[in-house]
Image: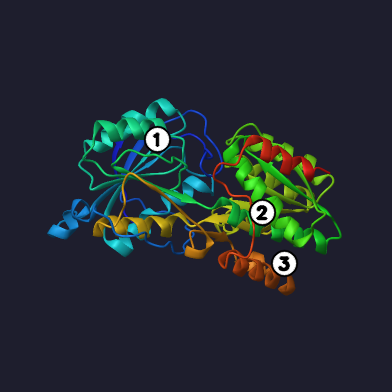
Amino acid sequence: MKRKVIATVLALCMTAGLLAGCGAPEPDEVETTEEAAPEAAEEEETAAPEETAEATEGESAAAEGGTYRVGLMIPGTLGDKSFFDAAFASIEPLQNELGVEVEYVEAGTDTSKYYPALVDMCKKDYDLILTISSNNDDALVEAAEEYPDQKFINLDDEMTDPPANVYIMGTKNNEMCYLAGAAAALKAQELGEDTIGFVGGMDIPGINEFLVGYIEGAQAINPDIKVATSYVGSFTDTAKGKENGLLLYNDISVVFAAAGQSGLGVIDAAVEKGKFAIGVDSDQAEALKDTKPEMANVIITSAIKNIPQNAVNVVDRAMKGDVNYGTREVFGIETGAVGIAENEFYEKLLSDDARAQIEELKEKVVNGEVTMTPNEGITTDKINEIRDAVRP
């Protein structure tokens, strides 16, 4: 896909993680680019919420015969093979499936750059501005209040009371991590082990939502399973991520890395130790198989947020006036908003019987037959209780 650089404000650095997904990044830059083609995407479907009074307001330039213009603000840096890369991967399907014009801003990890980046985008008269993660919530609210006629959508965030011109999409992290935990427990069981591991970017509620779902999914396979946890303290430190991974792999064989770019270090540790990893946010095995096949070959599956297809669905709704701005809605496995990677590596690294058990659990989640601790409103005390109960 042809790329035209509109303006480069600052230089590109290394990758960040996420808050709403896998962590808050650390400082860097801003770049604006038009019609960029992504390199990897995970696609499934989300469901459209009910039609609202925003319908006539939401009618766009496209409805009048013009080109619908979308700006995408990424509050982080690309290259994590995970959350922010998944946001970038939304561009191509938005262009190809909806025929919209897309420009993006890679805002880096310096949060002081987010508000001016959004203001610059507001001055470009986009029909819609997309962003992602909780990293830029303050900047988003400020910009939205300053530009009340501009429509914004955050593709993955936890903000529960957004401004009237902002729509927030949330994902049921516990559901995808539940299946990831089941996959980890089944692999450990196959290896004769009763302990699995978890490496988080930081010990914060947003990451511990992943941990809780992971634990409960593992317990669905083995009620007595133990889960060893560690935290990198960063979402961009691959060296520290590898160090954490190596320590866990001394005693166990399967680790879930919910740590943004730091998680790549955990996967590298799995390669070095001849062990296995669970990826996060994107299909990390698919993203790595061409450039780092040795890493792809140790990733059993990934807990996926299907951000590219979620973006297509919500922009399509926005073009039709079906988005309920001023609210937040949460989507899970039932609508295809989240899931796990079921690729060639999944088929190779898990037995037919193990995959059948996971499929059965997935159906139970969809049918409401599984009781999980909800993401919403989980307290630190509850997280500590669940984490401490499974310590090795």
Q: Point out the tag, 3 or 1, that comes first from the N-terminus.
A: 1
Q: Distance between the Cα atoms at labels 2 and 1? A: 28 Å
Residue ID at (84%, 46%): 251
Q: Position of residue 22 (x, y in %)?
A: 56, 42
Q: Distance between the Cα atoms at labels 3 and 1? A: 39 Å
Mark 2 belongs to which amino acid?
Ile
Q: Position of residue 260 (x, y in %)?
A: 57, 42
Neighbourhood count class around disc 3 (C-alpha, 10 Å): few under 14, some 14–19, many 20 upward: some
Q: Is residue 331 above or below residue 350?
A: above
Q: Is residue 257 above or below residue 29?
A: below
Residue ID at (33%, 33%): 117
Mark 3 belongs to which amino acid?
Leu
- In terms of depth relative to the viewer, which is nearer, 230 or 324? 324
Helix, strand or loop at label 2? It is strand
Q: Position of residue 387 (x, y in %)?
A: 73, 42
Q: Is residue 261 above or below residue 44?
A: above
Determine which residue is flagged by label 2: 278
Q: Position of residue 56 (x, y in %)?
A: 18, 55
Quarter of the picture containing the N terminus is bottom left
Determine which residue is flagged by label 1: 107
Determine which residue is flagged by label 3: 350
